[in-house]
Amino acid sequence: MNRILVALDVPNGDAALALAEELRGEVAGLKIGSELFTAAGPDIVRRTIAGGDKVFLDLKFHDIPNTVAGAVRSAVQLGVWMLNVHASGGRPMMEAARGAADDHVPAGAERPLVIAVTALTSLDAATLSSVGVAATPLDHVLRLATLAQESGLDGVVASPQETAAIRRACGPDFVIVTPGIRGGSAAAGPDDQQRTATPAGAVAAGSSYLVVGRPITAAPDRRAAARRIDAEARGQT
């Protein structure tokens, strides 16, 4: 199973479409986040889906329940495969997101996966403490992951350092999407990720999908980089 979701963190739609075409068949899907969506809008989602790609819309909705439900409704109508909200928005907000996903699937389509961001991989214990979170990153993430599952969501986004604990707590069917993939052929130099792991380490811990950006998109040969990271995730190196 290919678990790689490549992050299209590029500044315009033309660059995103070129990457999508180049990597089609080498990755499981595409992640479209705030940078690209702000630059290119919903049309870039439609165009990548029309090209045959599965799209994870990574906009991390976090607002009052009614507003989040409206955003999820719009995302569902775009045809995305997966979308996310912030778990820290609370149970009513997450339940509203799941309800909107259930209620607005176009005829003949499947409901997208709805997952929740736990704690950004850029956050370490000191940064969490500075915003009033006294718990360790692990305890904080586990609390939010459990809350997301209780709210009816399909899974979470969490760093590889928390993946094994979430898998034990939430069971085999809970989707865990893991950013912060570094090390081995996925090395990308210094960046803002704090809680990271290798592809093989993340999968061994229980990750369902691995979000990979710069280790693929900044590589001289992007298709070869995607193949190497997929092989590492499968334990074939």
Image (cartoon, rainbow, N blue to C red):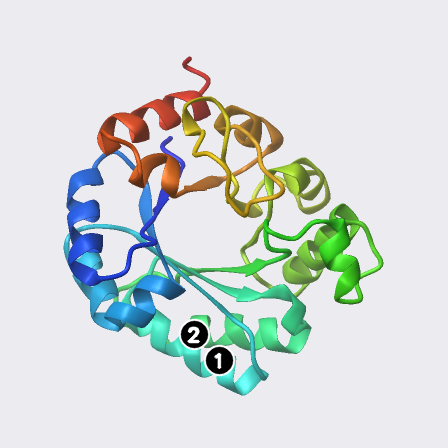
| SS type, badge 2 | helix
Q: Residue at x 50, y 26 (%)?
A: 183
- Given residues 195 and 96, the one toward you in this image is 195
Q: Quadrant of the N terminus?
A: top left
Q: CA distance from mark 1 to mark 2?
A: 5 Å
The residue labelled by disc 2 is 72
Residue identifier under label 1? 69
Q: Report the side of 41 relative to 152 (left or right).
A: left
Q: If the image is split into quadrants, where does the C terminus sit?
A: top left
Q: Secondary structure at mark 1?
A: helix
Q: In the image shown, does 61 or 12 lie closer to the viewer?
A: 12
Q: Residues within 10 Å of mark 1 (few under 14, many from 20)?
A: many
Image coordinates for residue 109, horizontal then vertical, percent? 29, 63
Evaluate whether residue 103 shows in this view.
no
Q: Residue at x 70, y 59 (%)?
A: 144
Q: Amino acid at mark 1?
A: Ala
Where does the image place residue 72, in percent across and percent down from the top left? 43, 74
Does the image show residue 182?
yes
State how many labels appear.
2
What residue is shown at x 54% (from left), y 37% (from top)? 207
Amino acid beneath label 2: Val
In the image, taking residue 78 as reference, residue 132 lies left or right, namely: right
Q: Is residue 20 left or right of residue 76?
A: left
For the residue pair 98 and 183, the one nearer the viewer reads as 183
Does 201 sit left or right of 162 as displayed? left
Q: Quick check: 193 above or below 39?
A: above
Which mark, by number, is residue 161? none
| Labelled pair 1, 2 in contact (Cβ < 8 Å) | yes
In the image, residue 74 above or below residue 167: below
Quadrant hosting residue 232: top left
The residue shown at (15%, 49%) is 18
| Dot 2 alpha-carbon crowd within 10 angstroms: few under 14, some 14 to 19, many 20 or more | many
